[in-house]
Image (tube, rainbow, N blue to C red):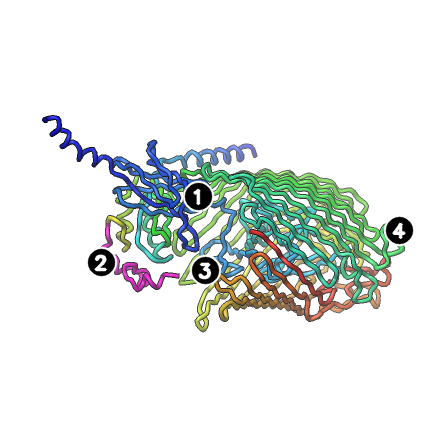
Amino acid sequence: MKKVLVIMIVMLVSIASFAQNKNAKASLEVDGVCLMCKERIEKAAIRTKGVKSAIWSVETHELKLIYDERKTSLDAITKSIVAVGHDTKEVKATDEAYNSVHPCCKYRDEEVQDDHKN
Amino acid sequence: MKNIIYIVFMLPLLLFSQDQLSGEILEANTENKTIPVVGANVFWLNTTVGAVTDLDGKFTIPYETSYKQLVISYVGYQTDTLTIDAPKFIKHNLKPSSELDEVIVTSRKQSTVKSYMRAANIITVSSDELLKAACCNLSESFETNPSIDVNFSDALTGTRQIKMLGLTSKYILITTENVPSIRGASQAFGLSFIPGTWVESIQITKGAGSVTNGFESIAGQINAELQKPSTDNRFFVNLYGASSERMELNTHFNTKVSDKWSTGFYIHGNTHQAKHDVNDDGFLDMPLYNQINVMNRWQYVNPEKGLVSFINVRYLNDSKQAGQLDFDPSRDKLTTNFWGSEIDTERFEITTKFGYVNPEVPWQSLGVQFAFSSHKQDSYYGLNTYDINHNSVYSNVIYNSIINDSRHKIKTGLSFTYDHYDELAINTNFERSERSFGGFFEYAYDNLDKLTLTAGLRFDTHNLLGEFITPRLHMRYTPWEKSALRFSIGKGKRSANIFAENQSMFATSRSINILNTNGSIYGLDPEIAWNYGVSYLQGFNLFGRKADVTFDFYRTDFQNQVVVDWENPQEVNFYNLKGDSFANSFQVELNYNMFDHFDFRTAYKYYDVQTEYLTGKQSKPLTPKHRFFANASYVTNAEEGATSRWKFDLTYNWLSEQRFASTSSSSQGYRLPEESPTVGTLNAQVTKVFSPKFEVYLGGENVTNVRQNNPILGANDPFGSNFDTTFVYGPIYGSMYYAGLRFKIK
């Protein structure tokens, strides 16, 4: 019994230590209009190696990122997002990538933007 | 003159290096109003260069190309860091900070919410749903919910009993803010000790719950979140009166003591002093009772340091008197003059919670929970005395983090629990202490798309139950749009409190026997069961309106059970299971928004609950095979901005025949048929909302006036050998009408 408890405590401590990585925080402006966009943007960001957390807001178009600076960079994350068809401030998605998104996510279209108000 | 030339050439450089960054900081809010944040701190990370926002939320700050990270922080809001690469105008929304995960933001468009995204099958009931019934205490909160069955447990005490997946509440882990609260001594009456107005929301989990809350849940888990001092109304009062002459008062006072501390004081009183005997059997149809329930809550929130804390102190005094009309306790207590019962409960609780969220890495958090409760019940039923003292300590430490990224979440921690029971029953003193120490680990995977999975494992060492492992798994897969397919499996273990959980047996003439006493708790072994289930939820449009349908199938398989055997009408026998015992539960539920502000909900359930008794394998008594439920609700003037409106609610429940435990060996004239009749009840409520501060409600329970004839066997000779109050399948009291008012200041 004591052995099991000791093992458990060691596991707990080692997990706490393991989690002490060096992380950078950043915020990107990413164009999108709906929760489907949110899913696509967050998935693209978090699947970039080294990204720990990615949360995008439909209202503010802000993508909040926490990532390991030793493994990735803002440029790499931006590339992943642009590759799935969403514009950022500095880099625009190619027309090919933009056309691959779902019709109701076509954020460049004024008609689509109007549809997503209220 | 040369000097002048030099100065002229240097000026552009100076001006260039004094570039400014300007911006505006607003509050993010759901109404999309423009609310400036006044006095927010804006500074460059790792520097002393900063500014404060003005009355319009605007700021100006020196800019250099070497500055990249701009930090914006303010009390009550989440600190944000922005990456700046050019000195252009910034417009940024700060979000108000929230407390820990316990604060659940439910959609106000539906008062009961099912999730398409979570791995576990969880139904969240918001406070709007709770107001659809008069909802004096927690058990009555479930009358408008099809997942929980509500019925009476006996003919005397008027206590509501709840069931889930065909199993009674002892197999459900009932927690208050994730601290187990209704268990042990409070199992029988504990739901009536939580006033409905104290509840902010309820989460109902079908199937095994989470390993973080212990090893005891078998059929599911119910968690009640209480009102928070920082968000509840500053003042609230609810007055209630019913045609049965039941009266209730609820009052809340909440105040902010400082920018970090808030406190709340909650008072509940209810009383019923009128005698009713609608069926003329000489017994009260419902008891006389008084309850005083007081709670003081303290809440501390420090978002800059990531700290949240709650301290709860609670005191309860509850007394009930039941039995014959002419019973006078001062004269007839424990005599054969008249049959009578008194149940006096005193309960004290203190609960503390401490939470820390690392502001730098928000997925990392630590939570500590500690609770102590003291429960003292003195009671007698006729000539049967039953007293129980139960002291309980619960403590839990939970650490949350991630592996690599937020798709892989982990929870791990340690638990310690201690219970001391001291009971007097069947003229024997039973005393025992239970201590358990355990650790748990839970992994959650979310691929942000079709799959979500939660796997948990816990190890516990218990002085009476031994050393054991509790595995649990929940999984959700989304095959196509607006759908969720769920699977869960898990194990649970519990020690049975055979007297506290079956107190209605004291109100019978049966002898109480414990057979084959080789185990560690009352001579019996603990209960162990596996639960597994499948659920499918699909949303769709019907005639252009939103609808969803759910199919659930769950099975609970007992490896061991403490069987409560009522099959001999002269005895109630407790023994460990030999053979099979299981509960199969199937449910189909439809929700439909027929037209604006009109919601309809209906459900059908099928139960197959069987156990091997001494007399063979039989269905569990007083469990209907079929149940039907329907609820309709309508709100007028629900458009934004309207302050005056009407709300209408109607709920119908129907139960099929229920098997009676055998009475074939009773004397002639005291035998019951094999099955009960069917029962259908209708509840209705109308609420008039005059303003955000004031509303009045009027309602009826059992409007169809359905009543069970002769709920008490042998009522004419309560000290004879045929007296029994446990054969209850439906309402005893007929129609009951009520009215009340709610007043609040936000």
Does residue B604 appear to the left or right of B426 in the view shown? left
- The alpha-carbon separation of the residues under discs 2 and 1 comes to 39 Å
Q: For marks 2 and 1, give the one nearer the viewer.
A: 1
Which kind of residue does numbered mark 3 sit on?
Ala
Residue of label 3 = B484
Q: Is residue B203 magenta?
A: no
What is the chain letter for disc 2? A
Magenta part of the chain: A91-118
- Which subunit holds the residue at mark 1? B
The residue located at (25%, 42%) in the rendering is B86
Mark 4–mark 3 distance (CA, rounded to whole Å): 62 Å
**Location of mark 1 (residue):** B77
Mark 3 or mark 1: which comes first in sequence? Answer: 1
**In the rendered image, residues at marks 3 and 2 fall on the same chain:** no
Q: Nearer the viewer, mark 1 or mark 4?
A: 1
Left or right: residue B518 versus residue B70 is right
Please, what is the three-letter code of the amino acid marked with disc 4? Answer: Arg
Question: Which residue lies under the disc numbered 2?
Answer: A95
